[in-house]
Amino acid sequence: MSMSQMTQSDYSLFASSAFDANEYANATLSGDPYLPSSDSKTSSTGKQASKLSAPEASAKDDISLAISKLSLGIEDVSKQIKSLVTMHHEDLLSQAANVNQLSGSLTSVKSDLSDLDSLVEKLRCKISVPYHSLHISLSRLQKFQQASDILRRTSRFVILARRLEGQMAEMDGLNRINDFSDPKPSETAAQMSSSTSTSGTGILGDTGDDRDRTIAKAALSIAELVTLIDGPGTAGSGIAAGLIVEAGNKGSFNLRSINAIASRIPFIEDAKITVTNEMENMVITGLSTLNQSLLASSLQTAYNLGVLPNQVQALMVELSQDVEDRIKRAFDLTAISKDANKDGIASPNPGTSTGQQYKSRVRTEPTNITASQWTAALWIRLEKMTEEMADCCIKVYTLEKVLKLKRDTVSQTVFLDEAMTILENKPSATFWTALSRALEKHGRDSARGSSFIQQTLSTGYPKLLRLFHEFFAKIAVHTDTIYSPTNQSPETVLVLRSLTHFETLYLSRSASKLNEAIAQAFPSNGARASPSSNDGVNIARTVTNELDSARFDPLFVRAVAKTVVSGLNTMISRADYLIVKDRSAVLLSGPSPTPAQVINSSVATCLYHCHSRLVKLSEEYSDALFQVISPNIDKIHATYEHIIDPLLTAIRRELGAIIARLHRNDFGKSSDRAAGMGGPSFYMKDLVDKLSYIKMEVLSRFLVEGDNHKWVMSIVKFVLRTFVLHVSIAQPLGESGKLQLTTDMTELEFALSVFMVEGSQSQKRGGNLESLGDEYRLLRAMRPLLFLENRQLANPVYTSGVPPLIVLHHILVRSPLPLPHSLHGWQEAEYVRWVDEHSEEEARTLIEGGLAHWEKMAETEGRDPKEAEEYISLARTVLYNASP
């Protein structure tokens, strides 16, 4: 066993904090194992553990062995100490020096701490004694101040109590004067009038003012007295609270324990009750008579009492509840039934006997016999309801006006600001909210519970709306509400929104009427009906009637206009479904119109008459309202044009194709007298027949009045313009051809004159071709142009009335020069269509280009330019004269 191991096992016992040398020696001499004193108190298990852990602690060890072990241990410990001192002697010396220095510093610090303790003790002695003395003095001062405050409050209370006694006595005296001066019930109206005119304006008027002022002063005294007794928080806001807020904060002494004050408290409470009752009576009287001066005095009294916010809140609750009760009574079916059964409301039908009338019990729904009486009773109750609503509204605005204008004379506090401390909104806003909520609630509930009320007010919604117009007009004098076509106050809009249930039902009925008229003209069952002009007039009349019934109200008529928009959209979609858009709708083969053309003409006629009447609404209604329905009116016209435009295009195309057939004739051959020359050409006969077919079978089915005449005029102008263009490029052209063209022109004039006739031959409208203007003058000028000499073609004197393009065409027809369409490889009809689609300047540029091209080709191919020199010169002269 090594020394270190022996040391660790043997020294553990000696290192114990409970080791006792005497006990250890006794245990060794007796041969018993040594247990430290702490281990001896443990259990037997603990003892067994100590025995096992004690080194060499057995009975077999003798004393010599123990002494040798102790000697060996002491020697070993001494060696270890010496070794540690040898190894760490420098550190030990350094620490010893530091400890010595620290000892000196600690001695200085200890001395300073002692001085500090003595100074603290002296300072404590200097502060403690004055503090205790000051504390005692402050306690005495507070008691003196409390006693002084109690005396001051008591003195003030006695003064105010005596003043209140005088004010109450004065108020009683004024009340007796008023009671004595009031007219007795037995006095006549003349006596009342004379007493009012004499004493009422003199003694009674002054007495009433004095009485109001006395009540206000008494209220101020009462409020200050209550505040003196119970503290500043009990009297509310007011002058009294401000006068003694300091005293109330300092003292918590209850003045009620003072005999001089306690004896007067019952009187003060009775006076407070009396003044409060007087104030409430003044408020009610002021609101009933709309007496603003009386109302201002009563509000001043409430302010002095410190109850102004609560009083205003109570008034608003009472007025709002009153309005709600009156609205509820107006829709009460039981009361309506009783009113309907009175003889004064409506007499029974003459044809019914008294025995036939059912009066066994109160009914909640009218019968067919009593329906008119019930309706009259309901409207009478509604009229009375609006009058009562107006009265309540005027009272609310009068109250708010007085609150807004009235200020306290001392604090300059606005009464409305004082009332708003507990009110959520202004009185007017609170009233309008309560009114609209009550109208919406009871109106909707009554409509749900009674089909009679629902049907009466939905069908008679305009009448109901007029009642509210009268309500707005009545309150407009006393309030700032406006309800006009250009401006509507938010309050009026809020009230009318509460009637949206009945408005919705009315709009639904209005939409049903319009949809019925539309369904009659355009059934939705898939059958292709043929609407007539009467259907279009009926639809427009329905729209006009619905708008007329609502035109007195700007918001209502706008809602009806939106319903009309929905109905017109339905009509447009149904009309679009009926319109035939395939080739049969524009087929002009004859001899009778196609079924598609018959249907389309009926739809177009209906749409035209509907549109022509609806567009006149712009003269009767404002621009803002008309803009609501104008897009749908424009859609009706667009749908109408979608029927007409393709048909007119097909007519022009058909007539143009017939006119283009004149180029199949050889106008350059000599005349054959044996062949009966002198009649119109075959193409002209076809053109005349087609014009007759278009007029009699196609256009006549469109009963569109003015538009029909415009179509005829546009078709005639197109025929004239197209015919002249084709005649101007007819080549070759001889003398007999010119005569034939002249004959054709005469035939065309007659055919067009007949085509333009409307109605019977005795009643012509537009049958005179002179009304066509330039197109007809061009046709008349075309005849002499055909027979002019070449040199005259370039002279504007001979070609006046003929466009330069036509003259150029005729020059090219006479010359060997190619026409523009032949130069470019076009057909005659294609060239005429090109001229129609482009300006005359572009057409002249095309001809000038053709002249230059021919000159260049003639020079290239070596042709003799003399044969065309004359015509080129004429053409250039015409081009020069036509240039700007």
Image (cartoon, rainbow, N blue to C red):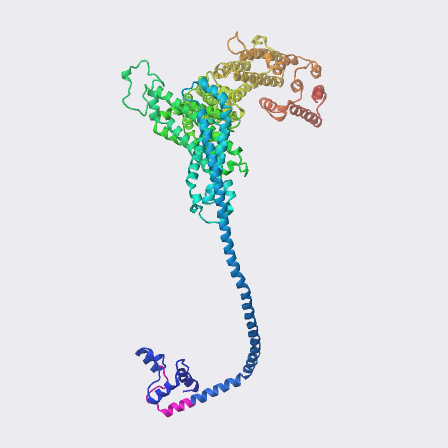
Where's the C terminus, which quadrant? top right
| Image height of 325 relative to 805, above or below | below
Q: Give x and y (percent) for residue 685.
A: 53, 13
Q: Quadrant of the N terminus?
A: bottom left
Residue at (37, 27) in percent of width and height: 329
Q: As displayed, is residue 125 above or below residue 723? A: below
Whether 764 is drawn above or below 63: the answer is above
554 relative position to 454: left or right: right
| Residue furthest top as drawn | 762
Whether residue 60 is in magenta: the answer is yes
Which residue lies most toward the front here?
260
Residue 453, x across and y down, in percent = 37, 25
Q: Viewer-proximal residue, 693 or 380?
A: 380
Is residue 768 shown left or right of residue 473? right
Against 301, residue 523 (above or below) is above
Magenta span covers which residues? 53-71
Residue at 32% x, 24% y: name it.
Answer: 365
In magenta segment, residue 136:
no
Q: Quadrant of residue 269?
A: top left
Q: Residue 783 location in percent, x, y? A: 63, 12
